[in-house]
Amino acid sequence: MKIAVIGTGHMGAPIARALSEAGCAVSVYNRTAAKAEALAAACPGMTVAASAAEAAAGADMVVLAVKPHLILDVMHLVLPAAPQAAIVSLAPGITLERLAAEGAARVLRLMPNVAIACGEGMSFICHSADAAADASALAGFLAPTGRVAVVEERLFEPAMAVASCGIAYALRYVRAAVEGAVALGIAPADATAYVAQTLRGTAAMLLQPGAPHPEALVDSVTTPGGSTIRGLMAMEQAGFSHAVAAGLLACVSK
């Protein structure tokens, strides 16, 4: 499959790399040519185009990994060069219906999070009715970047809040936990490593086949009258669970 990736920034670059490693013929274009050239130099077989239209020429799929306010303008530039290509948008807030109305043959939306760069991403795809095969192919190509889920469009923005915005929310927990650990006398670098490993272990338990509900795992490490339950009660009194849920709701509110 020939795929063009327009934009080789934090999201576009790892996507292009994964597509190339999956055996796709990838052509990239970036406004700052040096970024695209550096990426292609590290990915044998990847080509660099002089324009978005040149990258898209004859492509089966075009991934638009540019800033949201540029998505429609760039799509109009590439459609004449690839009128039958499936168009993949990384822009939040621009619906499949809107993309289709702009003249694309088949449309998809893709939202990875930044952890795709280290192979531990969580990506979501939604698609128009006629692009199911494209979505399946794209999910397969991106599998090495982490987990990929194909969801209904009505769940796309909520999923983004949980996993894309969620990176920042998780990091805020890390920062808070590290500050608490420092107050208890642990060196900052050590505290960061301890918290990160704790999160890694927690995620590994949750991702095991047949893993119990998170609250069951909480119960398994909470001794009656012990320090864990005292800590949990203090966090809840400060509004921990409510704050997390409120943050997610605020993320998707219009």
Image (cartoon, rainbow, N blue to C red):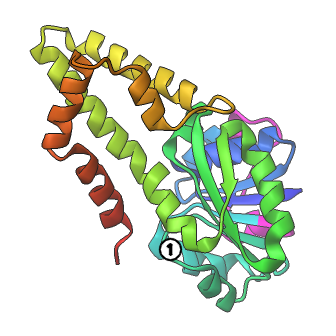
Q: Which residue occupies 45% across, 53% down?
A: 162
Q: Which residue occupies 29% across, 10% down?
A: 190
In the rendered structure, the answer to whether residue 222 lies left or right of residue 227 reads right
In the rendered structure, the answer to whether residue 157 lies left or right of residue 30 reads left
Q: Which residue occupies 27% across, 14% down?
A: 191
For residue 28, above or below residue 122:
below
For residue 234, above or below residue 11:
above
In the rendered structure, which amino acid carries the disc numbered 1? Leu
Residue that sits furthest to the left in the current view: 183
Q: Quadrant of the C terminus?
A: bottom left
For disc 1, the marked residue is 70
Residue that sits furthest to the bottom in the current view: 101
Stretch of the chain drawn in magenta:
40-61
Query: Closer to the camera, 23 or 150?
Result: 150
**Residue 82 in sight in this render:** no
Report x, y in % for residue 132: 82, 69
Residue 153's quadrant in the figure?
A: bottom right
In the rendered structure, the answer to whether residue 229 lies left or right of residue 185 reads right
Report x, y in % for residue 46: 78, 45
Report x, y in % for residue 34: 56, 45
Q: Quadrant of the N terminus?
A: bottom right
Taking the magenta stretch, the answer to whether it contains residue 68 is: no
Report x, y in % for residue 160: 49, 58
Q: What kind of element bears circle 1?
A: helix
Taking the magenta stretch, the answer to whether it contains residue 59 is: yes
For residue 148, above or below residue 104:
above
**Residue 188 in sight in this render:** yes
